[in-house]
Amino acid sequence: MIDAVVLGRVGIDLYPDEIETPLQDVRGYTRFVGGFAGNVSTGLARLGVRAAIVSRVGAEAHGAFVREWLEAEGVDTRFLAVDPYWPTPPTFCEVWPPDRFPITFYRRPTAPDWQLSPGDFDAEEVAAAPLLYATGTALAQSPSRETTLAAMRAHRGTTIFDLDWRPSLWDEPATFPALAAEAAAAADVVIGNEEEVDAAGVDVPTLVLKRGERGATV
């Protein structure tokens, strides 16, 4: 039985072997699994939660790496579909301690997880899971947008919506507030930092406000 389902983006994160180095000067990277769904499902599994990921990867070596990594962490990958066309997206990171970590996404014109459709997972099993985590980035494109909203509305347990506001990933950033409000209406808990909450403008019963080094406020 699944304790938690995490729905959203997943890919590979390439972290530089050299810190405090501009991206153009980096000579080597170490590969990890990243993205909202990859990070959250891994974290839950490490805490002993029976977590499943609902997403897509490409039909290539990076996609195989993501699957193997997640399975080694104990994540249920039955609903990690394989996209026959779009490759697994890489994200390049810079490391400037203590608090600057610029990232460069490669998700244009689309990415496998934005092609997520209802046929990629068992809707009843997802609806019956005690916890469902969804991400705002999944609303940036169709068919992931409609698939995510439908899964949130159908879910019978506790639904958590992370705003995950990344303007560079939206073709039409102005549509974010309305879509975020639609998703928040189907959620029991909304998570976001101060910038994300301001951008979304949502009014929800329970908000977890992330405040960086100042902690979080509920």
Image (tube, rainbow, N blue to C red):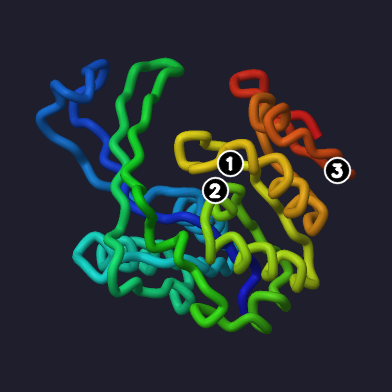
Q: How many marks?
A: 3
Cα–Cα span, label 1 and label 3: 16 Å
Q: Nearer the viewer, residue 117 or 14?
A: 117
Crowding at label 3, few (<14), some or many (≥20) Cα neighbours within 10 Å?
few
Crowding at label 1, few (<14), some or many (≥20) Cα neighbours within 10 Å?
some
Q: Quick one: SS at disc 2?
A: helix
Q: Quadrant of the N terminus?
A: bottom right
Q: Which residue is mark 1?
A: 164
Judge from the rendering whether residue 21 lies leftward or rightward of residue 81; answer left or right: left
Contact check, label 1 and label 3, Cβ < 8 Å: no
Residue 62 position, x and y percent, is 24, 60
Q: Which residue is mark 3?
A: 204
Residue type at the position of mark 3: Val
Cα–Cα span, label 1 and label 2: 6 Å
Q: Quick one: SS at disc 3?
A: loop
Indicate which disc residue 137 carries.
Answer: 2
Residue type at the position of mark 1: Asp
Q: Residue 157 is drawn in which quadrant? A: bottom right
Question: Vertically, is 19 above or below 8?
Answer: above
Q: Quadrant of the C terminus?
A: top right
Kindly identify the residue that appears in the image at 56 percent across and 66 percent down: 51
Kindly identify the residue that appears in the image at 32 percent across and 23 percent down: 95
Q: Is residue 46 visible?
A: no
Judge from the rendering whether residue 169 lies leftward or rightward of residue 124; answer left or right: left
Residue type at the position of mark 2: Thr
Contact check, label 1 and label 2, Cβ < 8 Å: yes
Question: Vertically, is 127 above or below 12?
Answer: below
Residue 146 position, x and y percent, is 62, 65
